[in-house]
Image (cartoon, helix red, strand yellow):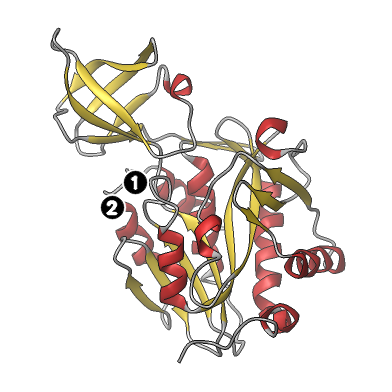
Amino acid sequence: MNLQNFAQLCMTPAPLGNEHATINLIRQTVPEGFAIRTDPAGSIIVQKPGQKPGLMIFASLSEPTILITGKRADGSWKGKLLGTGEKLEALDGWEISDGRGAYAKIHVKDGELYFAEEKNITVGSTLTQRPVWNQDGEKIFCKGIGDRAGCWLLMELLHHIPEIDREITCVFLAQERLNPRVAELAANETEAAVAIRIGCAPVNNRDMTGVAVKFGQGPAIKLRERYASTDGRLLEFLRELCCERKIPHQYELAELSITGLYTAQYGGCGVVISGIDIPEDKGCILLSDLEYTENLMQELIKNADKLSGVLSSLPAVRS
């Protein structure tokens, strides 16, 4: 595991609509032999050519973002939380920056954002939580880890894709928090038949996961979220892989969650979807869970051709 890349990724801001610094960092880590392009939404599509229909694996590139919208009558700055995934109250006390000198500290009062110690902010500034990275034994702490962990795992997978005759595509999805439809756009670009989203699932939060996701028990396979369900054939395929390779795993029922899986399933001629999530608690994940998740994704890629039970029932690839 290249944790140096992980740390660098966590220290690089990726505000919604302005993910350029993170995009440049990811591009520098892509091995030779892959086709790289950017779709109209700004997502990075990294592709290994092969037989179609293929497998698409994606993760969210952006972070919870504060947009500075103007000033109140008393001269204090106003701001808005962009996208989904964070409650306003959870931002109280955050230090935010844009990585280029703008800075402020958030105070939440009466359902509104207030700022203190402001530096170099103006109308239109987009700021994210100030970079945080810390490793304490098996525990890794970083800001925006729900997105950072998935992107780093994609970066790792690109260095371990085996020689198989199946198109494999990794997508670093821009602006997903603002509009999940960007996943459908990416699926259209890749002509994928199966799409897997890598993210994080909160530990011991039955409201979000339906079951108690635990640390140290491996990736949580998403049974469904609000507007999307894992295909039963794909679920069985993932379960068998875990059992055969002795990869610890668990399940989640994310009834309140809305991600790009919702729209990815409508891409192309129809895409079979599932989510694979790393257990997370307040910005912390375990190296063991990260390793178990990476092992599962590597096995899935190695066995992509065996997805025929899922792929064969889908319409023909577009001409």
Location of the C terminus (image quadrant): bottom left
Q: In which quarter of the view is residue 138 placed?
A: top right
From the top left corner, tell me how far across and down residue 7 is, in percent: 46, 46
Number of numbered discs: 2
Numbered circle sitting on residue 21: 2
Amino acid under disc 2:
Ala
Above or below, 92 against 223 in this view is above
Q: Residues within 10 Å of mark 2 (few under 14, many from 20)?
A: some
- The answer to whether any part of residue 30 appears in the image is no
Q: State which tag comes first along the sequence, 1 or 2.
A: 1
Asked if residue 301 lies left or right of residue 156, the reply is: right
- Please report the residue visible at 26 percent of the width from the left and 39 percent of the height from the top: 99
Q: In which quarter of the view is residue 241 placed?
A: bottom right
Q: Which secondary structure lies at badge 1? A: loop
Amino acid under disc 1:
Ala
From the top left corner, tell me how far across and down residue 281 is, in percent: 62, 33
Above or below, 60 against 119 in this view is below
Asked if residue 38 lies left or right of residue 50, the reply is: left
Do residues under tags 1 and 2 come within 8 Å of each other at their CB atoms?
Answer: yes
From the top left corner, tell me how far across and down residue 161 is, in percent: 58, 76
- The answer to whether any part of residue 311 appears in the image is yes
The nearer-to-camera label among 1 and 2 is 1
Residue under pointer 1: 14
From the top left corner, tell me how far across and down residue 220 is, in percent: 72, 49
- Please report the residue visible at 50 percent of the width from the left and 74 percent of the height from the top: 169
